Amino acid sequence: MSKGDKFLKWFFGGRGVVDERFKQELGKVATKTLMVFFGVQMIFLLSFGMYMFLAPIEDYETLAEILWLCEMLGTSVIFLGMEFVLIHRKVFVQELPEAKANKTIRHLKFEWFRRALIAGIAYWLLMAWFDMGKAGFFAQLFAPDTIRSAVVWFVLWGATMYGIQRWQLRKIKDDD
């Protein structure tokens, strides 16, 4: 397996094999996404540049924040669109025999529980750190609101991510 295939396998979840169909679909969609991204960026920056040149601007800081917000929203919409195209084409769907599928599902449950637990603890620590102005770090760390929000994040994020990866697995019957 080449280094590029290993990277793709790691980046897209680590299960299965990177086959030619996957590479071909990903290449087509990535090329189209890059062209759309370039076109949207050119139009956006030209229009924003004209606005900055023609309009009397007094507060450049607010203008920069609006520019950054529009950039992030536009980029997010474009790349989410790319993901939806790949999902619609069923590029991420993996077909497995029943025995291997059951083993993979058990592995996914453990993997997402572990990842969600780590993310929940990180979220808990960050929320306590960001809210330190209200009280000390440890007082805020063990406050019921901070713990409750971390547990909700742990449960919702872990269940959602497990559900998404579980949805991408298809069981096929063995031909024995």
Image (cartoon, grey):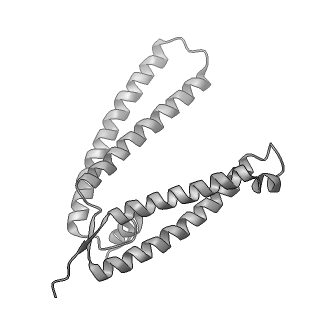
Q: Nearer the viewer, residue 66 or 117?
A: 117
- The residue drawn where x is 55% and y is 28% is 64
Q: Quarter of the image holding residue 58?
A: top right
- The residue drawn where x is 73% and y is 53% is 144
Quadrant of the image for the C terminus?
Answer: bottom left
Q: Nearer the viewer, residue 110 or 70?
A: 110
- The residue drawn where x is 27% and y is 64% is 93
Q: Quarter of the image holding residue 44?
A: top left
Name, please, the residue furthest toward the bottom: 176
In this rendering, the answer to whether 113 lies above or below 147 is below
In this rendering, the answer to whether 49 lies above or below 163 is above
Q: Nearer the viewer, residue 25 or 111?
A: 111
Quadrant of the image for the N terminus?
Answer: bottom left
Q: Quarter of the image holding residue 97?
A: bottom left
Relative to 132, 82 lies left or right: left
Name, please, the residue furthest toward the left: 175
Provide residue 168's location: percent of width, then percent of height.
32, 64
Provide residue 109's location: percent of width, then percent of height.
46, 71
Provide residue 32's location: percent of width, then percent of height.
25, 46
In this rendering, the answer to whether 102 lies above or below 10 is below
- The residue drawn where x is 45% and y is 60% is 161
Numbered marks: total = 0
